[in-house]
Amino acid sequence: MSPEGINAEGIPCVSIAIFAWNEEAAIAATLRSLFHQSLFAQLSKRNLTCEIICVGNGCTDRTPIIAAEMFGKQSSEHPYPASFNCRVLNLAERGKLNAWNQYVHSLSARSAQFLFMMDADIRIHRHETLWNMFLALSQDAGAGIAVDRPCKDISFKSHKSLPERLSLGAAQMTAAAEAQLCAQLYCIRAEVARNIYLPKDLAACEDGFIKALVCTDFLTHEVKPERVRLAQGAEHTFEAYTSLAAIFKNQKRQIIGQTIVHLLIDDYLKTLPLPQRLNLAQALIRKDNDDPRWLKRLIREHLQRTRYFWQLYPGLLQHRFRGLAKLSPMKRLICFPSAAASFFITLVAAFMAWLFLKAGSTDYWPRAERTGFAETEKDLPASSVEPPGFGVRQSSGALNS
């Protein structure tokens, strides 16, 4: 479907969600970069509109207030105010999974054909990012999701420390994999999203769960990576983890999430009858409502069958080396130290995740340790900017250090 062929007649054909949990220090910059996007001029030119919803999930700081102030200012000062409407909602229940479910199934406009999912602590540094993602999805009937390239803020720095170089090497290995979906920013067809429900105990890997469902058309065929489409000329920046403690916590969180995704995608959901898989959101909503502990039981049974912590899911320790093998010989040599360091970090984090899951817990979302965006990137305008000296930038995968 071409964007010119959508006749919205003033009702939103695009909906943008900004998911926020206590992001008062970051959300103003995030929203400034959002409102610099060319998407609004392009929609205005076609007499189309979008809605923007800041979905706070249990915020206890000034995040909703700052977002409302920014929305009010943009509604009066933006050059294309007729192309969008904004509102802020702060849900009482904490958790991104609940916020995602509420937004997709209750809060977003039913007229919206494309849903943008966006975190409240990123910067969209390319002016055409959202429009290019919109075009990539609207012009490719075979794609269910459009993604951009996530860039670590440290990639813009002229002089990088050893930990920063190792972090960027890990990013290059992740970028070598197909069909990468980064939960920080993506665009999904509304009819696809509305057949997805994120179980409350899914933990921190909703992107892996969503990608698996989209690339298999809800487990009805083998994986088709082309269902996730990378938009050209589309990038955003996020603050990289560089302290050892933050990297370990992030890896532990990702391993917990990947374990649960493995159980659901490779085991449980495949046993559901076809009609339930084709109406998966309703099936999972009923499951959560009727038996709130069903997923924790699956996890407990899996751990009883799992003899060693490195067997939480297939390929846990080989992840980085598989990415390394897909690089050119020269890049393999450059990235090998990152792969070796990642292996040992993953080994320790897997043990930590194993202990956490054995204790019957799933909700692990540590507060990010923020030091601020790298100085060279902190005040970047929302325009086309290349990270100097860094060719392949990160497309987030299962493990993101």
Image (cartoon, rainbow, N blue to C red):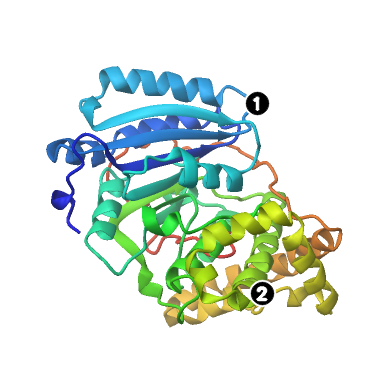
**Residue at (66, 79) in percent of width and height:** 314
Q: Residue at x 78, y 73 (%)?
A: 302
Secondary-structure class at tag 1: loop
Disc 1 residue type (three-letter): Thr
- Whether residue 379 can be seen here: no
Q: Nearer the viewer, residue 371 or 118?
A: 118
Q: Nearer the viewer, residue 121 or 191?
A: 191
Count how many numbered circles sit on residues in the image.
Answer: 2
Q: SS class of the residue under badge 2?
A: loop
- Residue 47 position within the rendered picture, expressed as x and y whole percent measured from the top left: 15, 37
The one nearer the camera, 272 or 261, is 272
Q: Is residue 11 above or below residue 289?
A: above
Is residue 125 positioned above or below 343 on the image?
above
Mark 2 vs mark 1, foreground winner is 1
How far apart are the alpha carbons under marks 2 and 1? Answer: 36 Å
Residue 44 appears at what percent x and percent y? 17, 35
In the rendered structure, the answer to whether residue 173 lies left or right of residue 263 reads: left
- Are the residues flagged by discs 2 and 1 in contact, CB closer than 8 Å? no
| Image quadrant occupied by the N terminus | bottom left
Q: Horizontal placement of 116 versus 352: left or right?
A: left
Q: Is residue 196 visible?
A: yes
* Identity, as a three-letter code, of the amino acid under mark 2: Leu
Mark 2 or mark 1, earlier in chain:
1
Which residue is tagged 2?
A: 316
State which quadrant residue 165 falls in: bottom right
Residue 156 position, x and y percent, is 42, 48
Is residue 94 depicted above or below 79 in this figure?
A: below
Q: Which residue is mark 1?
A: 60
Residue at x-position 64% and y-position 31%: 92
